[in-house]
């Protein structure tokens, strides 16, 4: 489905092409005849494996010889530049971001952002709240009390997330963000002690005195002003040097805005905690293959393609995920 302005172009492939290059080629062949300047592409479902494969095609055409490997909820490494070229915050948001960072003592690229997507309707959350209440909570239609099994779950998620964030750069200040105001307030008012060989106590910073964060897919009509806190969180996290995030795409988007240079993933796909270090946030590169350039000759792709980021590890993409090759790539 392709949407441009008020016009819609709906294109269905007659058959599925298993190779990611085949899927991308079908998209491109169908898009080219459309005269509009901007075209957005959405997929039938949001399975990150499909999105990762298409982003691998993007990387193959953007880099020379080796391409960054995409994994769950990861944005292309060029996202930090693409976003800042295409978008800038309106004045009220820009002023709020600057005032908040000054008040919290945050200096760009000198802090670690930790994000917990507390309202994500995982099976665990549905088991506590019930399916309907969990979905309604995620869409801001109802807010359960911060107590009992729900509180225990969220505090466990936050503690693990902070531990993962601390391990990225122990010297960094920690900025905590969540779509649960109750959880954010609790974390800010409770000193966090790391569980490492040399325990350290952190006074985590964050934004307090807020109403519940509105999600972009909010179930009811809201004013655009009500989304300002969400954008503020995204931009502050995107200005960090490291990001620890869990499931879903919001925290991963912030990591992308921070360049994906330093990140940790602190939750399993099903919603449970993932202890760190776990290797899931590692940055890997692999040789570009014809699979990802739609059988074009690599030598004919022209100049202007980028060298992969230095000091990324060599890996390979396999059907079930990512395999790491132990040697490090120092100079590419």
Image (spheres, rainbow, N blue to C red):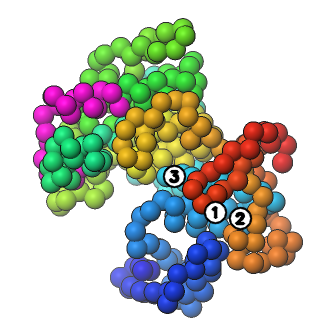
Tag 2's secondary structure?
A: helix
Identity of the residue furthest to the front in this view: 320
**Of the residues under marks 3 and 2, which one precedes in the sequence?**
2
- Image vertical order of residue 134 relative to residue 273, above or below: below
Q: Kindly check if marks 1 and 3 are in contact, taking CB atoms under 8 A apart as contact.
A: no
Question: Alpha-carbon neighbours of circle 3 within 10 Å: few (<14), some, or many (≥20)?
Answer: many
Residue located at (78% from left, 58% from top): 287
Question: Alpha-carbon neighbours of circle 1 within 10 Å: few (<14), some, or many (≥20)?
Answer: many
**Of the residues under marks 1 and 3, which one precedes in the sequence?**
1
- Image vertical order of residue 203 relative to residue 36, above or below: above
Instruction: State which region is magenta.
Output: 138-157
Q: Nearer the viewer, residue 280 or 261?
A: 280
Q: CA distance from mark 1 to mark 2?
A: 6 Å
Provide the residue designation for mark 1: 56
Q: Quadrant of residue 298?
A: bottom right
Q: CA distance from mark 3 to mark 2?
A: 18 Å
Tag 1's secondary structure?
A: helix
- Left or right: residue 92 versus residue 199 is left
Disc number lying in front (3 or 2) = 3
Provide the residue designation for mark 2: 60
């Amino acid at each position: 489905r392709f949407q441009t302005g008020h016009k819609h172009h709906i294109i269905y492939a007659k058959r599925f092409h298993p190779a990611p290059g085949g899927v991308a080629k079908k998209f491109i062949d169908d898009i080219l005849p459309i005269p509009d300047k901007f075209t957005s592409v959405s997929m039938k479902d949001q399975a990150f494996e499909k999105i990762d494969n298409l982003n691998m095609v993007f990387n193959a055409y953007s880099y020379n010889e080796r391409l960054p490997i995409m994994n769950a909820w990861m944005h292309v490494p060029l996202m930090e530049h693409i976003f800042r070229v295409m978008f800038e915050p309106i004045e009220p948001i820009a002023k709020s971001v600057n005032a908040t960072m000054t008040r919290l003592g945050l200096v760009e690229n000198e802090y670690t952002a930790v994000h917990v997507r507390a309202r994500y309707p995982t099976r665990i959350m549905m088991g506590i709240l019930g399916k309907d209440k969990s979905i309604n909570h995620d869409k801001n239609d109802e807010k359960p009390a911060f107590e009992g099994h729900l509180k225990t779950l969220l505090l466990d998620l936050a503690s693990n997330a902070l531990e993962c964030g601390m391990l990225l750069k122990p010297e960094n200040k920690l900025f905590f963000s969540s779509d649960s105001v109750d959880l954010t307030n609790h974390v800010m008012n409770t000193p966090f002690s790391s569980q490492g060989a040399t325990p350290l106590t952190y006074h985590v910073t964050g934004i307090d005195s807020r109403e519940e964060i509105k999600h972009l897919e909010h179930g009811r009509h809201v004013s655009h002003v009500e989304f300002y806190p969400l954008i503020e969180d995204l931009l502050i996290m995107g200005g960090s040097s490291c990001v620890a995030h869990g499931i879903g795409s919001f925290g991963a988007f912030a990591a992308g805005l921070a360049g994906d240079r330093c990140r940790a993933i602190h939750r399993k796909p099903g919603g449970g905690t993932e202890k760190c270090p776990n290797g899931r946030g590692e940055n890997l590169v692999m040789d570009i293959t014809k699979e990802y350039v739609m059988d074009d000759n690599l030598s004919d792709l022209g100049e202007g393609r980028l060298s992969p980021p230095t000091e990324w590890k060599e890996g390979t993409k396999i059907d079930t995920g990512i395999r790491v090759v132990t040697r490090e790539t120092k100079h590419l």
